[in-house]
Image (tube, rainbow, N blue to C red):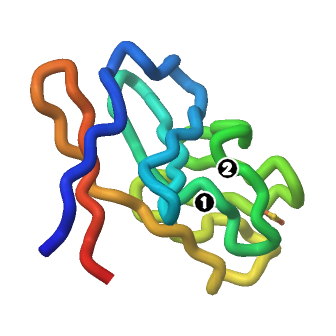
Amino acid sequence: MEKIMPIGKISDFDEGKGKSVKIDDDTQVAVFKIGGKIFVIEESCPHQGGPLSEGEVEGLNVICPWHQMKYELESGNSSSDAWDKEYKVKAFKVILEGEDVKIEIPDL
Ligand code: FES
């Protein structure tokens, strides 16, 4: 069974920016609000662990602040041209209940 975890209120997140949210000891996510819509991906870049919440947002992509790998916020897929396309982050399903933002964490 997947877990549904609260990550805050819509107003906790700034438009066009990322914010790191710790869910539990195993899960830290990067939350982005773009055009009022919330996107949630893993916080840690699979290349060398760069903090994706601190990355620059470009359209619906985030650029890792360490070595500029780019990821699609919706799918978590790499959208870099020059880098290995196999790099990918987990993108979480977002559930909105009024002002409350929750994510679905699949069973591993
Ligand atoms: S740690 Fe993210 S691109 Fe290197």
Question: Residue at 18% of width from left, 43% of height from top?
Answer: 95
Question: Residue at 87% of width from left, 54% of height from top?
Answer: 66
What residue occupies the far top of the structure in this picture?
11
Q: In what element is the residue under mark 1?
A: strand
Of badges 2 and 1, nearer the viewer stands 2
Q: In what element is the residue under mark 2?
A: helix
Name the image quarter holding residue 34. top left
Q: Position of residue 2 (x, y in %)?
A: 18, 69
Label 2 vs label 1: CA separation? 9 Å
Which circle's residue, 2 or 1, is located before the other in the chain? 2
Q: Position of residue 92 (x, y in %)?
A: 35, 58
Amino acid type of disc 2? Leu
Q: Is residue 66 left or right of residue 45?
A: right
Instruction: Dividing the image into four quarters, tell me where ligand 1 lies.
Output: bottom right
Q: Quadrant of the N terminus?
A: bottom left
Q: Nearer the viewer, residue 73 or 47?
A: 47
Above or below, comparing residue 48 to residue 24 in the picture: below
Q: Which residue is mark 2?
A: 52
Above or below, comparing residue 13 to residue 91 in the picture: above
User: Which of the labelled discs sits on residue 56, or is there none?
Assistant: none
The answer to whether the residue labelled 2 contacts the one labelled 1, judged by CB atoms less than 8 Å apart, is yes
Q: Residues within 10 Å of mark 1 (few under 14, many from 20)?
A: many
Q: Nearer the viewer, residue 28 or 90?
A: 28
Q: Quadrant of the C terminus?
A: bottom left
Amino acid type of disc 1? Tyr
Disc 2: residue Cβ within 8 A of ligand 1's nearest atom: yes
Q: Which residue is mark 1?
A: 71
Question: Residue at 40% of width from left, 24% of height from top?
Answer: 35
Q: Is residue 81 left or right of residue 17?
A: right
